[in-house]
Amino acid sequence: MSKHEEFPRIKRLPQYVFAVVNELKAKLRKEGQDIIDFGMGNPDLKPAQHIIDKLCESAKKPHTHRYSMSQGIPRLRKAICDFYERRYGVKLDPEEEAIMTIGSKEGISHLMVAMLSPGDIALVPSPRYPIHYYAPVIAGASVLTVPLPLEGSVSERQELFLKRIYETYEDSYPKAKVLILNFPNNPTTMIVEKEFFKEIVDFAKKKELWIVHDFAYADLCYDGYKAPSILEIEGAKDIAVELYSMTKGFSMAGWRVGFVLGNPTIIYNLKRLKSYLDYGTFTPIQVASVIALDSDYSIVMENGDK
């Protein structure tokens, strides 16, 4: 057996793009090259001081170093639900419609493991953030890609993208089980309006198609545009969940705080799976995240276009 022989599941995974970029970056820096880093989108601003202070305060308490909860402490789940009601007018039940994840990347990965089995099909935009494609692959499912329009107005692009989703779904056999969306989109920056979500929710309900919307870039909006949550759409919680991350707007990338919100059936199944896999994020991080959400602070909003 070769020292680096790959197991069957790993053979379906190419080298992770950011791992390759990081290796190349380290090699060039070691050679003394002056490089501009176009790798991972790491924030270069620290979180607000009151959030850091709460982290330190909580870490000094002996009981906060015990095992935490894989679904997130109750205060944090309530805080994200309150945050969604203030910001998007969406009411969520913190017990059945909200779960904390160790960042949105872990969330979507384990979500696909919970939702998909070998033989199932996922619809995924292209181009896309790598985990949107490879999380279904890791779960053993097949993936069909739907090309994102790269030109035209917002309305023209979303209309064409909807048409492509419908066509790809109808051509799939067996029929796709889940559709992964991501707006504002990484890497194309494509945005959509509420009308897009209204149409796709209506389509998904008719076809019994689950929707997973990665809303990680919710806070990176400019020129007066406010990204809509899919959960703002009436009936969306019947077939959709949304992933929200504190990485971008709160400049908390290394803290690994994310959430899956919405459909209670999906939340229930993810909760069951995660109970076997982790004990949640370090409790002081969760406590400080409550303070961040309650204060509705956004490092992006404070710094504007800087």
Image (spheres, rainbow, N blue to C red):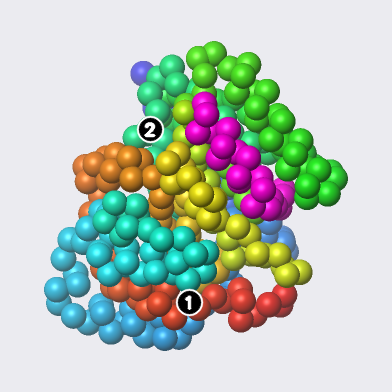
Q: Position of residue 48 (x, y in %)?
A: 48, 82
The amino acid on which the numbered mark 1 sits, given as a three-letter code, is Asp
Q: Residues within 10 Å of mark 2 (few under 14, many from 20)?
A: some
Viewer can see residue 7: no
Query: In the rendered image, which quarter is residue 129 located in?
Result: top right
Q: Identify which residue is drawn at 47% across, 34% down.
A: 210
Query: Does 297 appear above or below 189?
Result: below
Instruction: Provide the residue span drawn in magenta.
Output: 187-207
Q: In the rendered image, which quarter contains the C terminus?
A: bottom right
The residue shown at (51%, 49%) is: 234
Locate residue 267 relative to residue 246 in the image: left or right.
left
Q: Is residue 289 left or right of residue 30?
A: left
- Alpha carbons under labels 2 and 1: distance apart: 32 Å
Disc 1 target residue: 296
All told, the count of numbered labels is: 2
**Quadrant of the drawing holding the N terminus:** top left
Above or below: residue 304 compared with residue 73? below
At which x and y percent is residue 39?
63, 54
Residue type beneath disc 2: Met
Q: Which residue is mark 2?
A: 115
x 78%, y 47%: residue: 155
Camera-side residue: 181 or 126? 181
**Element under label 2?**
helix
Image position, residue 64 (x, y; %): 19, 72
